[in-house]
Image (cartoon, rainbow, N blue to C red):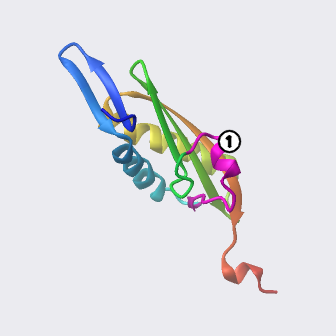
Amino acid sequence: MPESYVTNQTEKGNISISEDVVTVMVTAAIAEIDGVAGLSNPTSTDIAEFFGIKNAAKGVRITAENGEMTVDVVIMVRYGYAVTVVAKKVQEQVAASVESMTGLNVKVNVHVTGIAFEKNDMKG
């Protein structure tokens, strides 16, 4: 099977879930959180490559090993929201969502690459 699958070995065999499916779970969970402007699409791929993200446009990296999954997300936070509060909510929401849908233990690393301003915020 291609490398783009997360595989969980069970006593009855293997369960393989496409990383793209997990990415959809992650992005859906993040979309529900107030204060997240969206997944970051760095202007340079250097940041994404540093975090090992193959597709910088998605801003999500998934790795799995021994029945545990690590999800790295790169987000932008909306101006006016507490960055650490938003990041913690992302961790909790993504972990709960992916764990409930895959049955795997999930660790979530949140990388905040910037603050997003509303267009009206810049007018003076």
Q: Position of residue 97 (x, y in %)?
A: 38, 42
Q: Secondary structure at mark 1?
A: helix
Indicate yes or no whether the magenta region holds residue 38: yes
What is the quadrant of the C terminus in the image? bottom right
With respect to residue 124, does 4 lie above or below?
above
- Residue 41 lies in quadrant: bottom right
Residue at (32%, 24%) from the top-left corner? 8
Q: Is residue 47 left or right of residue 15?
A: right
Identify the residue shown where x is 20% and y is 19%: 13
Of residues 100 and 18, which is closer to you in this image? 18
Identity of the residue drawn at 66% across and 53% down: 45
Q: Position of residue 51 (x, y in %)?
A: 63, 40
Q: Is residue 102 left or right of residue 54?
A: left
Say which residue label 1 marks.
50
Neighbourhood count class around disc 1 (C-alpha, 10 Å): few under 14, some 14–19, many 20 upward: few
* Quarter location, residue 79: bottom right
x and y percent of residue 48 in the render? 63, 48
Q: Which residues are magenta?
A: 36-53
Residue 80 can be seen in this image: no
